[in-house]
Amino acid sequence: MRAEGTAYIAYCLYKEVTVNRMIISKSPAGKFMLGIDLSDEYCQISYLYNKRARFGRGFVNAATGGISREPVTFTAVQGQEAYDIPMALCKRKGSSVWLAGRAALETAQDGEGIVVTDLLQKARRDTPVKVEGEEYNAGSLLALFLRKCLAMLEPEIAPEQIGALVFTAPSMDYAMEQVILRAFSRLDTGAQQVLCESHQESFFSYMLMQDAEQRRAGMLLCEYGADGNIVFSTLLYNRRTSPVVYWTQTGRRSIAPGVHGAGRDREFTAAVREFLEQNDASAVYLTGEGFDGGWMKDAAVYLCRGRRVFQGENLFSKGAAYSALLHVDKPSEIPDSIFLAQDALRSNIGIEVLLREQKGYHVLLDAGVKWYNAEVEEDFILENGKEFSLLQTPVTGGEPQQLTVRLNGLPDRPDRTTRLRVVLTMPAADRLKVQITDLGFGEIFPTGGGTWEETFTV
């Protein structure tokens, strides 16, 4: 039901949606889907070959040629789980040769080169990097590192064989996304879709590709860093919506880095027990350096009671590879779903419309879009009155709300003779800015020059 006095919109003239991502077209089967996990310390690369097996039961394993639903993670040491590529470049002294990863650190340790680390943060700050008296652009160095990482995958994967690629990082915001996309744009690959996401989003994609039983009562991710900080993230969902909506609920604990053995086991067991008493989970994933050392005894017993427990260090790069697949060629058995990241819109934003004299609902912004990627521009013809109303519908529960902009000063005109240009943007994850411009109605009713702007909490 619309509020009394709220004007209907007659129809939409055109629509233009802009998002800050690199998309050319959908990637066909027969291409590699890559997931790259980036931090200032390391890079990980996982990939799968998107050639569907018979009956859709899996994908071709790029390493063995067999059938698997799991991505393969690049390892620098054959036969070992040496997944981390150090996030470092090294320039050989007196030479134009640059090395990356382990070779970079080894060359610097031997005193034969100048090492450059913290590549992501340097590129984000856009500060020049001086090496042997010469200045280098930090973004160019990040692009060089990525180029050398992709070269490590050859001859298994040639650049032109990459169909889609997703970068993931512990946290992803607009600035980080732009730094990564600008760096990648300098490379020559066949990637037809390049996206950026947070670790939480990669975790969601990973879980979506696992057995449905694991999602029965929620999933718990435990990230335990070497600094003693622990982040618990529970993946929750609302099955009453279509598509199903997922989001995370997080909690933080810490254990002093000096606590080892039975003491660490005891403190971690108490922390995870406290969290799980309020957030049930049917599957638990453990990742991070804090779990090294084989100290888990009581914690393992507790976690394995009625739950499936997994531990590994390549969860996010695998999840990013799955994200690449889900964006371009989602398997038919995977249910439609939306993940609400921390920086995502948690409501559908739309308007009630009249189209061919029939009432309907027209979506402008979908729940799940990142606030910094949310931008839509459309033209409408006002049915009557001097108000423009949007309908906000939360997807995590709650009643729809009207967001009304009063068009004070709009010239008096007959019904359906006022054309409005509406631009929606989001200055923050919980703020929606509405900008409206009076375009008049051609030569019959010239524009009055009016503009209106209002920001709502969503």
Image (cartoon, rainbow, N blue to C red):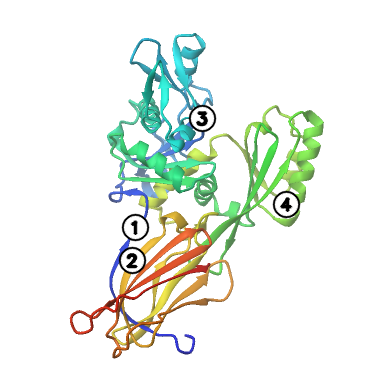
| Residue placed under numbered mark 1 in the picture | 18
Residue 84 image offset from top left, x and y in percent: 51, 28
Asked if the residue under mark 3 is in contact with the one under mark 4, i.e. CB atoms within 8 Å, the reply is no
- In front: label 4 or label 3: 3
Other residues around mark 1 within 10 Å, as few (<14) / some (14–19) / many (≥20): few
- In front: label 4 or label 1: 1
Asked if the residue under mark 1 is in contact with the one under mark 4, i.e. CB atoms within 8 Å, the reply is no
Say what secondary structure mark 4 lies in.
helix
The alpha-carbon separation of the residues under discs 3 and 1 comes to 32 Å
Please tell me which residue lies in front, 197 or 298.
197
- In front: label 2 or label 3: 2
Asked if the residue under mark 3 is in contact with the one under mark 2, i.e. CB atoms within 8 Å, the reply is no
The alpha-carbon separation of the residues under discs 1 and 2 comes to 9 Å
- In front: label 4 or label 2: 2
Say what secondary structure mark 3 lies in.
strand
- In front: label 3 or label 1: 1
Asked if the residue under mark 2 is in contact with the one under mark 4, i.e. CB atoms within 8 Å, the reply is no
Residue 42 is marked as 3
Where is 302 relative to 278, above or below?
A: above
Residue 135 image offset from top left, x and y in percent: 37, 23
Where is 133 relative to 258, above or below?
A: above
Q: Residue type at mark 1? A: Thr
Where is 80 relative to 226, above or below?
A: above
Q: Residue type at mark 4? A: Leu
Can residue 304 be seen in the rendering of this structure? no
Question: Which badge, 1 or 2, is on the more N-terminal residue?
Answer: 1
| Residue placed under numbered mark 2 in the picture | 377
Where is 336 relative to 295, above or below?
A: below
